[in-house]
Image (cartoon, helix red, strand yellow):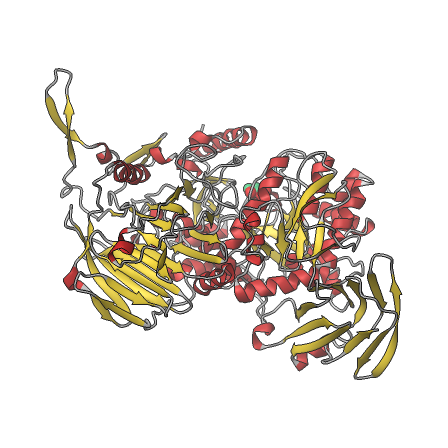
Amino acid sequence: MPLRTWALACLAVLTLFVLSEAVKKEDFKTCSQSAFCRRNRALADSANSDAHWASPYTLVKGSIRFSNNYMTADVQNTQTNNVLVLELQVLVDNTVRVRMDEKSPIHPRYRDHEQFTLVDKAKPIKPFKSGKNTDGVVKISLDADRKIVVTPSPLVIEFLVNDEPVITLNDRGFFNFEHLRTKESHKPKMVKQTKEDGTEEEVEAPEEKDLWEETFKTWTDSKPRGPESIGMDISFNGFSHVYGIPEHASTFSLKETRGGEGAYEEPYRLYNADVFEYEMDSPAALYGSVPFMMAHRKNESVGVFWMNPSETWIDIVKTSEQAEGTAVQKVLNLVKPSSNKKSTKTHWISEAGILDIFVFFGPSSKDIFRQYTRLTGQPAMPQNFAIAYHQCRWNYINQNDVHEVDSQFDHHDIPYDVIWLDIEHNDGKRYFTWDSGKFPDPIKMQKELDQKGRKLVTIIDPHIKRDDDYYVCKEAKDKSLFVKQPSGDDYEGWCWPGQSSWVDYTNPESRKWWADKFKLDNYQGSSEALFVWNDMNEPSVFNGPEITMPRDMVHNGGWEHRVLHNIYGQIYHGSTAQGLEQRSNVPKRPFVLSRAFYAGTQRFGSIWTGDNMAQWDALQASMPMILTIGVSGIPFAGADVGGFFNNPSTELLVRWYQAGAFQPFFRAHAHIDTKRREPWLFGDPYTSMIRSVVRERYALLPYWYNTFQEAHETGVPIMRPLLVEYPEDENVFAMEDQYLIGSGILVKPVTEEGATQTNVYFPPSDIWYDLHTHNLVHGQGSQVVSAPLDVVPVFYRGGHIIPRRERLRRSSHAMTLDPFTLVIALDKQGEANGSLYLDDGETYAYAKAEYLKGQFHFENGVLSYTVAHSNPHFASTIASVRVERLVILGQVAATKAVATDAAGSRQLQMEETQNGKIVVRDPAVLITENGWKIELS
Ligand code: NOJ
């Protein structure tokens, strides 16, 4: 058999195998199978078990300098004598950066990821106060309340609020910075071992194993640079909950990882990986990685961003501390008698790079989201259509199929905005091409969709089929844009197209070339109604170690893949987004869905939680997963509605639509081997149940858009954990089965088979109204609510005004000029506030102030409206848009409603129902007009 045919045959077998087995845990390393994780965990174990353990790292007192707003000092490892340089910088907005790198490395360590991760140059500012004492203790104050204290020996860095350390680095002495060395110069650590005959011999210590070469299954990693890992313990003092570090199918409040009841045995792992049928409740790595963690306690949040895109493991343990205090507290006489609290102690271990930690002082979680996204970038403002409903499957087989599915949505009166084409749409998995037999006229297909305001998404993966007759491959080869083997030849591996190579997006030339591929002339058969799905970008390599690229492959500048693995998919995602943005004369906001992600992905688009199962536990897991991704800066996330693998029961599908309609990215998707499951295939009552919840998504689109805009501006998650809004309520700190959308809507999807009721926790500081019945919720705290299959429990929060659009349309585009219904959910004082953000939903004109922002306020029976911002050009495009209904919830007694606007005063038609609700019909006030009022009396 020729090599090529053999390879393809193997691929087919492999694919079949892959598609027929559940997760193969043995395909992925455990910490003990990863030499650097093993070494660092062993160090932690020795530190824990040795009462006399002291970290060998010491600040060299004479080297401390304060200049250019930095504090720098040498840090010496007293065991190896290797010297590091510590840089401490205070940044704007209660943020501190701590960096350490070798003072004189034998070659540079990787830092280039900074340009892909940070948008802000992270310029230091002059601290409020800084100084050192004669013992070499450095104190830097951010303001009167917050300071950093560095004790020199052993090196400990504390972040204090009101003299209490909230975060401490190296208090457990796990700091470890493996300096670069040559194999020849390396002196192995020797230990004594007793032989069988009782005599002693010297042998290499266990940690010497795998320093220069490491084998996992059949793959050997050549590790030409030897060991270069970094480990650091970070303690969150007095915080019993930590969150973040996606992506894992785990709990929202993260678990302990060093064994014991309910704890994991393995650390949380960040190593972007394509995991087939991934396991639930596990710290194992998945498709994306964001090394960001937030800790929360009553009314206070702090955060840490460990900026390192190489493989990273994080151990978590929780402790109860006694009042004796930490080393630094003792030195400074800061021990407070009350410091008997539960703390979370974490241990971060990365394979390579430098130590680069950002500490966020908060003090609220909303502050943390702003501080973190100020550095890593604002979540992109999506186009209108992107937040509506998406219909996907692997695969809509041909143009007719697309046409048919599209028409059926209309026939069944179910709105949708986007239809997706998976990998079978192109010519032999050659991206940017079409299978012309199946899709003879893709432009016509897109035009037909576009006429209804709908879009098409095609999949474009980063693996490029090795085929000299395929222009994308030929060009990349000729321009030398592929990732290389150590020999300098193009790296080749297997993916969907068979033998493939991977574009090296870390090369600026590749990024430019790739972005240009999306020009309408270059991507034949594409139009401005076509958007993109970036899949398999961990990168997934079917025959690679852990289904990915070998770590010793080489990127631009000679950097090994290992140093940047976790950011590869993000750079690719960014290049695609740039391509879509620049393909039109007036740049449009791109829509690109990515599977892999890293810190900063929020700038480029949305992500989803990959290949989930059509099972109840996967539906349950979607909530903590999206909440976790959301608090880690990426608000636009979702899970495949219905479950990707296998066929959901009708009940599960309905429940999944109900959950998905209230998650930021709302897309149904299914594996090629599953039965078709478009909503009309189930018949009534199920089709109606799905229709009704999809319509509910559309009705709430104005509210979703407002919330996306808020996330864009502030970084605050769209799907919001309750602790963000109720930071003082300990009942909600670990809550993951209910959440808020923005600040005004509470959602508790039903995720138990057969359930007809569910428990909902109603934070007692507010009052709540059922979104469907408009009834006030009686009782506070945990309440049982009825939830038969046609009901998803959703509630308006008192004090909020929610804009809705209730005309039934085919797509979001068709709703652009529709009137608004305002749901005014009054709080205990009979007041409510809300806002309305509108822009063209498509371009970046909003950045040039072409948008409208209106504010609603209800008090003493009067609704008043203020246009906080308006742009004449944009306002002229929505001049006719009016309010067509007010729904006031909250027992206001009134018999009369009068609207007063520029046209004068007029009495309105009103109707009162027995539920304490008032509906005011057609006040016909314009949303572009400032200052109107509607008075109830
Ligand atoms: C893997 C993706 O996760 C899945 O959504 C997609 O359908 C297949 N690749 C085929 O492209």
Residue 593 spot, x, y in % from top left: 56, 53
In the rendered image, the vertical position of residue 252 relative to residue 906, given as above or below: above
Residue 184 spot, x, y in % from top left: 14, 42
In the rendered image, the vertical position of residue 840 relative to residue 730, given as above or below: below
Residue 833 spot, x, y in % from top left: 68, 68
Quick check: 877 left or right of 913?
left
Frontmost residue, 111 versus 73:
73
In the rendered image, the vertical position of residue 794 relative to residue 542, given as above or below: below
Residue 716, picture quadrant: bottom right
Frontmost residue, 257 versus 521:
257
Residue 106 spot, x, y in % from top left: 19, 53
Quick check: 351 left or right of 623?
left
Q: Taking the image as drawn, is residue 542 in sight? A: yes
Residue 72, picture quadrant: bottom left
Q: Taking the image as drawn, is residue 416 in sight? A: no
Report the number of numbered marks. Answer: 0
* Residue at horizontal 43 percent and vertical 53 percent from the top: 476
* Residue at horizontal 35 percent and vertical 68 percent from the top: 142
